[in-house]
Image (cartoon, grey):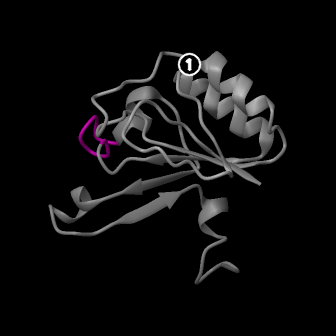
Amino acid sequence: MAVVGLSWPSNLTHRPNFTISSPSRSSSGCSSRCAVKMGKIAAVILEPIVGNSGFITPKPDFLNALRKITNENGALLIFDEVMTGFRLSYCGAQEYFGITPDLTTLGKIIGGGLPVGAYGGRREVMEMVAPAGPM
């Protein structure tokens, strides 16, 4: 299984072999990269708005294309909302862009600035995690 790691110019030079990089953040670039691994994608993980490499916003159809690709592959769409959660809008980038990911990660914004992290998501996914699920 592959994990799609969408990337753009940064100082990171090493990319694990199990990731697919799509530097363009365009729906066509992402679709063509993912088509090579169709049926083998486990998850797509991304920051909806990239903060540490400059304030890079997605093109209008980009997140919708990712949602479509993950649905077609039976893969998870995971938003890293450590920077955008509760800042971009009350429910983060997912509310702002109207895209519902399967999982969301949040950081110290939920702890009032204290070092804390959390994740949440769709019931079907969360029920796979202990104590309710097998993992």
Quarter residue 4 falls in: top right
Give x and y (percent) for residue 50.
36, 35
Question: For this rendering, which residue is in front, 16 or 124?
Answer: 16
Measuring from the top left, give residue 127's x and y in whole percent.
Answer: 64, 70
Q: Residue at x 44, y 62 (%)?
A: 119
Q: Quadrant of the N terminus?
A: bottom right
Considering only vertical position in the picture, is 119 above or below 83?
below
Q: Secondary structure at mark 1?
A: loop
Check residue 118 for magenta coloring: no
Q: Quadrant of the C terminus?
A: bottom right
Magenta part of the protein: which range? Answer: 84-91
Numbered-mark total: 1
Image quadrant of residue 53?
top left
Per the image, the residue denoted by label 1 is 26
Residue visible at 67% across and 60% down in the picture: 124
As displayed, is residue 9 above or below residue 86? above
Residue 69 locus on image (x, y percent): 71, 32
Residue at x-position 73% and y-position 38%: 71
Left of 111 or right of it: where is 91?
Answer: right
Front-most of 65 and 37?
37
Q: Quadrant of residue 28?
A: top right
- Residue with the most extreme front position: 13
Identified by mark 1, the residue type is Ser
Q: What secondary structure predominates along the stretch shown in magenta?
A: loop
Left or right of 92 on screen, residue 66: right
How far across and down, in percent of the image, does residue 118 sit?
39, 65
Asked whether residue 90 is drawn in magenta, I would say: yes
> Mark 1, residues whose alpha carbon is within 10 Å: few (<14), some, or many (≥20)?
some
